[in-house]
Image (cartoon, rainbow, N blue to C red):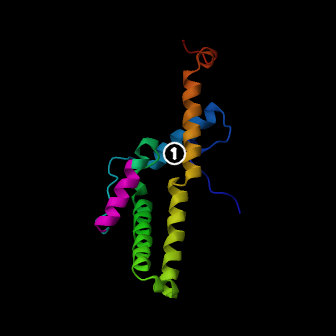
Amino acid sequence: MARPSKSVKTMSKNLTKEEIAIRTQTEEKLKGAADEILPPTHLNARQKKIFNFIVKELQASGILGNIDIYILSTCAVAIDRVQQIERIINRDIERLLDRNLLSAKDKYSKEFFRCCNELSLSPQSRAKLGNINFQVRVEEDDPLLKVLSGGKK
Protein backbone atom coordinates (compact mmCIF):
# COMPACT_ATOMS: atom_id res chain seq x y z
CA MET A 1 0.00 0.00 0.00
CA ALA A 2 1.34 3.45 -0.89
CA ARG A 3 2.28 5.91 1.82
CA PRO A 4 0.00 8.91 2.29
CA SER A 5 1.12 12.13 0.68
CA LYS A 6 2.82 14.64 2.98
CA SER A 7 2.88 18.39 3.07
CA VAL A 8 5.78 19.89 1.15
CA LYS A 9 6.80 21.53 4.46
CA THR A 10 7.34 18.12 6.03
CA MET A 11 8.95 16.35 3.07
CA SER A 12 12.60 15.40 2.93
CA LYS A 13 12.35 14.44 -0.75
CA ASN A 14 14.48 16.50 -3.12
CA LEU A 15 12.21 18.66 -5.22
CA THR A 16 13.09 21.50 -7.54
CA LYS A 17 12.39 25.04 -6.36
CA GLU A 18 9.60 25.25 -8.94
CA GLU A 19 7.98 22.02 -7.68
CA ILE A 20 8.23 23.25 -4.08
CA ALA A 21 6.69 26.61 -5.00
CA ILE A 22 3.79 25.01 -6.89
CA ARG A 23 3.06 22.49 -4.12
CA THR A 24 3.35 25.15 -1.39
CA GLN A 25 0.95 27.45 -3.24
CA THR A 26 -1.54 24.62 -3.80
CA GLU A 27 -1.33 23.45 -0.18
CA GLU A 28 -1.85 26.99 1.14
CA LYS A 29 -4.99 27.35 -0.99
CA LEU A 30 -6.33 24.00 0.23
CA LYS A 31 -5.34 24.63 3.86
CA GLY A 32 -7.46 27.76 4.02
CA ALA A 33 -7.29 30.33 6.77
CA ALA A 34 -5.85 29.69 10.21
CA ASP A 35 -7.65 32.45 12.09
CA GLU A 36 -10.34 30.47 13.92
CA ILE A 37 -8.65 27.39 15.35
CA LEU A 38 -10.85 27.15 18.41
CA PRO A 39 -12.03 24.05 20.28
CA PRO A 40 -15.56 22.93 19.40
CA THR A 41 -18.23 23.50 22.06
CA HIS A 42 -18.93 19.76 22.48
CA LEU A 43 -15.51 19.20 24.09
CA ASN A 44 -15.34 19.14 27.87
CA ALA A 45 -12.90 21.34 29.83
CA ARG A 46 -10.05 18.76 29.84
CA GLN A 47 -10.45 18.12 26.13
CA LYS A 48 -10.43 21.86 25.37
CA LYS A 49 -7.24 22.21 27.39
CA ILE A 50 -5.61 19.40 25.39
CA PHE A 51 -6.89 20.92 22.12
CA ASN A 52 -5.46 24.34 23.00
CA PHE A 53 -2.14 22.82 24.10
CA ILE A 54 -1.71 21.04 20.75
CA VAL A 55 -2.66 24.17 18.80
CA LYS A 56 -0.22 26.28 20.82
CA GLU A 57 2.62 23.82 20.33
CA LEU A 58 2.00 23.47 16.57
CA GLN A 59 1.47 27.18 15.94
CA ALA A 60 5.12 27.81 15.07
CA SER A 61 5.09 25.08 12.41
CA GLY A 62 2.39 26.85 10.42
CA ILE A 63 0.84 23.55 9.34
CA LEU A 64 -2.59 24.04 10.94
CA GLY A 65 -5.63 25.54 9.27
CA ASN A 66 -9.22 26.05 10.37
CA ILE A 67 -10.19 22.79 8.69
CA ASP A 68 -7.92 20.90 11.11
CA ILE A 69 -10.32 21.60 13.98
CA TYR A 70 -11.95 18.23 13.40
CA ILE A 71 -8.79 16.12 13.62
CA LEU A 72 -7.61 18.22 16.57
CA SER A 73 -10.87 17.61 18.45
CA THR A 74 -10.70 13.87 17.69
CA CYS A 75 -7.14 13.83 19.02
CA ALA A 76 -8.10 15.74 22.18
CA VAL A 77 -10.96 13.33 22.90
CA ALA A 78 -8.72 10.28 22.34
CA ILE A 79 -6.03 11.62 24.68
CA ASP A 80 -8.60 12.49 27.35
CA ARG A 81 -10.25 9.06 27.14
CA VAL A 82 -6.94 7.19 27.40
CA GLN A 83 -6.05 9.32 30.43
CA GLN A 84 -9.46 8.61 32.02
CA ILE A 85 -9.00 4.87 31.49
CA GLU A 86 -5.52 5.03 33.02
CA ARG A 87 -6.95 6.83 36.08
CA ILE A 88 -9.58 4.10 36.46
CA ILE A 89 -6.91 1.40 36.28
CA ASN A 90 -4.64 3.26 38.71
CA ARG A 91 -7.47 3.49 41.26
CA ASP A 92 -8.27 -0.22 40.94
CA ILE A 93 -5.57 -2.43 39.44
CA GLU A 94 -8.09 -5.29 39.16
CA ARG A 95 -9.65 -3.35 36.25
CA LEU A 96 -6.72 -4.57 34.14
CA LEU A 97 -8.76 -7.75 33.78
CA ASP A 98 -11.77 -5.85 32.39
CA ARG A 99 -11.86 -6.68 28.68
CA ASN A 100 -14.25 -3.87 27.81
CA LEU A 101 -12.05 -1.29 29.50
CA LEU A 102 -8.89 -2.55 27.81
CA SER A 103 -10.69 -2.73 24.48
CA ALA A 104 -11.73 0.91 24.86
CA LYS A 105 -8.15 1.85 25.77
CA ASP A 106 -6.87 0.06 22.67
CA LYS A 107 -9.45 1.81 20.48
CA TYR A 108 -8.59 5.29 21.77
CA SER A 109 -4.84 4.61 21.68
CA LYS A 110 -5.09 3.65 18.00
CA GLU A 111 -7.18 6.76 17.35
CA PHE A 112 -4.52 8.87 19.07
CA PHE A 113 -1.69 7.38 17.00
CA ARG A 114 -3.69 7.96 13.80
CA CYS A 115 -4.12 11.59 14.84
CA CYS A 116 -0.38 11.82 15.56
CA ASN A 117 0.31 10.82 11.97
CA GLU A 118 -2.16 13.34 10.63
CA LEU A 119 -0.84 16.20 12.78
CA SER A 120 2.89 15.32 12.70
CA LEU A 121 2.95 14.84 16.48
CA SER A 122 5.37 11.93 16.68
CA PRO A 123 8.99 12.58 17.71
CA GLN A 124 10.10 11.33 14.28
CA SER A 125 7.78 13.78 12.49
CA ARG A 126 8.95 16.67 14.69
CA ALA A 127 12.59 15.79 14.08
CA LYS A 128 11.95 15.72 10.35
CA LEU A 129 10.19 19.10 10.52
CA GLY A 130 13.07 20.53 12.54
CA ASN A 131 15.64 19.24 10.06
CA ILE A 132 13.71 20.61 7.10
CA ASN A 133 13.34 24.02 8.78
CA PHE A 134 17.06 24.02 9.58
CA GLN A 135 17.99 23.19 5.97
CA VAL A 136 15.76 25.99 4.67
CA ARG A 137 17.43 28.50 7.02
CA VAL A 138 20.91 27.34 5.99
CA GLU A 139 20.02 27.75 2.33
CA GLU A 140 18.49 31.20 2.96
CA ASP A 141 21.57 32.37 4.88
CA ASP A 142 24.20 30.93 2.52
CA PRO A 143 25.76 33.96 0.71
CA LEU A 144 27.07 31.79 -2.14
CA LEU A 145 23.63 30.35 -2.82
CA LYS A 146 22.15 33.88 -2.75
CA VAL A 147 24.67 35.10 -5.36
CA LEU A 148 24.21 32.02 -7.54
CA SER A 149 20.45 32.44 -7.50
CA GLY A 150 20.75 36.04 -8.65
CA GLY A 151 20.29 37.70 -5.27
CA LYS A 152 22.59 40.12 -3.50
CA LYS A 153 24.90 39.35 -0.57
Q: Dominant secondary structure of the magenta stretch?
A: helix
Q: Residues within 10 Å of mark 1 (few under 14, many from 20)?
A: some
Expressed as whole percent of the image width and height from the top left, the position of residue 114 reads 54, 64
Expressed as whole percent of the image width and height from the top left, the position of residue 64 reads 43, 49
Quarter of the rendering containing residue 11: top right
As drawn, the residue found furthest toward the top would be: 153
Q: Is residue 120 above or below residue 1?
A: above
Kindly tell me whether residue 10 is visible in this rendering. no
| Residue bearing mark 1 | 27
Expressed as whole percent of the image width and height from the top left, the position of residue 1 reads 71, 63
Residues drawn in magenta: 44-56
Point 54% across, 36% down: residue: 133
As drawn, the residue found furthest toward the right would be: 1
Quarter of the rendering containing residue 18: top right
Expressed as whole percent of the image width and height from the top left, the position of residue 33 reads 38, 46
Q: Is residue 52 above or below residue 85?
A: above
Q: Is residue 137 above or below residue 84?
A: above
Position of 1 with respect to 43 (left or right) is right
